[in-house]
């Protein structure tokens, strides 16, 4: 009797480890509006989960163009002399955030690469439209974003399971100030790989404290 119970438990564990987590990710940002929708399906569809993140409103500058309401960033013009210390502080904070992100990537790079190489990406869509109302600034920003996306594109093309469909595009807008990004991704990864990655994470986190 005990052997039968153990066999059933082992069988169920094998089924769970071999099953995949299917994820649908839709993220969009248009100026101050942000929205993320995540749909997760696991254990062969027995468990389904959906999470909607509500739009985050920052500032609004609504203009009516041809009868349609167009929402842009509201850039507040202030005296630079009054904001030198604030700008310096923001620059320092931004630098720290970038440095912390780089440090985290270096620390957990092996886990990130492990998961990327074992994740089956069906669709990877990333389109960005950007404009600052200044041709030089817009052109410089486009160049930086293209470098970033080029590196990400190369990374995904070098993993073991390459995305079935991958689409990266940057669109400049020289007529108005806008930042619009749309990301759509469908991918799946086996639960067993997630568990192994979690164990790797706890091992590295405890070892490097």
Image: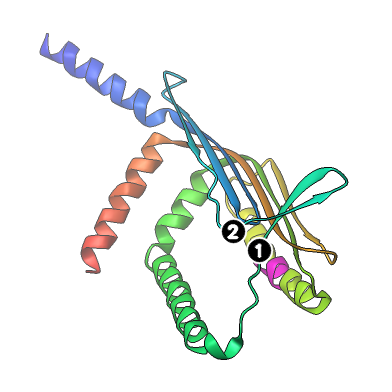
Disc 2 crowd, CA 10 A, few/some/many (<14, 14-19, 20+): some
In this view, 25 is above or below 170: above
Q: Which of 91 and 110 is in front in this view?
A: 91
Q: Is mark 1 on a helix, strand or loop?
A: loop
**Image disc number at residue 185:** none
Mark 2 and mark 1 in contact (Cβ < 8 Å)?
yes
Q: In which quarter of the image is the C terminus?
A: bottom left
In this view, 184 is above or below 154: above
- Residue hosting label 1: 74
Query: On the rendered structure, is 96 left or right of 130?
Result: left
In this view, 84 is above or below 45: below
- Residue hosting label 2: 59
Residue numbers of the magenta segment? 144-148
Please give the name of the residue rendered at 48% of the width and 78% of the height, measured from the top-left corner. 90
Residue 67 lies, in percent from the top left, at 85, 43
145 in the magenta segment: yes
Q: In which quarter of the image is the N terminus?
A: top left
């Amino acid at each position: 009797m005990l052997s039968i119970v153990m066999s059933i438990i082992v069988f169920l564990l094998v089924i769970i480890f071999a099953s995949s987590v299917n994820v649908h990710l839709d993220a969009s940002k248009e100026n101050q509006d942000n929205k993320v929708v995540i749909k997760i399906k696991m254990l062969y569809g027995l468990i389904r989960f959906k999470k909607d993140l509500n739009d985050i409103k920052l500032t609004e500058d609504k203009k009516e163009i041809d009868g349609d309401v167009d929402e842009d960033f509201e850039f507040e013009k202030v005296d630079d002399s009054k904001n030198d210390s604030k700008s310096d502080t923001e620059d320092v904070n931004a630098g720290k955030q970038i440095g912390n992100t780089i440090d985290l990537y270096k620390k957990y790079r092996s886990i990130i690469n492990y998961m990327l190489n074992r994740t089956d990406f069906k669709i990877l869509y990333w389109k960005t439209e950007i404009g600052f109302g200044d041709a030089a600034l817009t052109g410089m920003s486009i160049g930086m974003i293209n470098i970033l996306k080029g590196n990400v594109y190369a990374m995904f093309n070098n993993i073991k399971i390459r995305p079935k469909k991958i689409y990266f595009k940057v669109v400049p807008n020289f007529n108005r100030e806008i930042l619009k990004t749309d990301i759509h991704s469908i991918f799946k990864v086996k639960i067993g790989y997630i568990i192994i990655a979690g164990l790797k994470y706890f091992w590295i986190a405890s070892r490097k404290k």
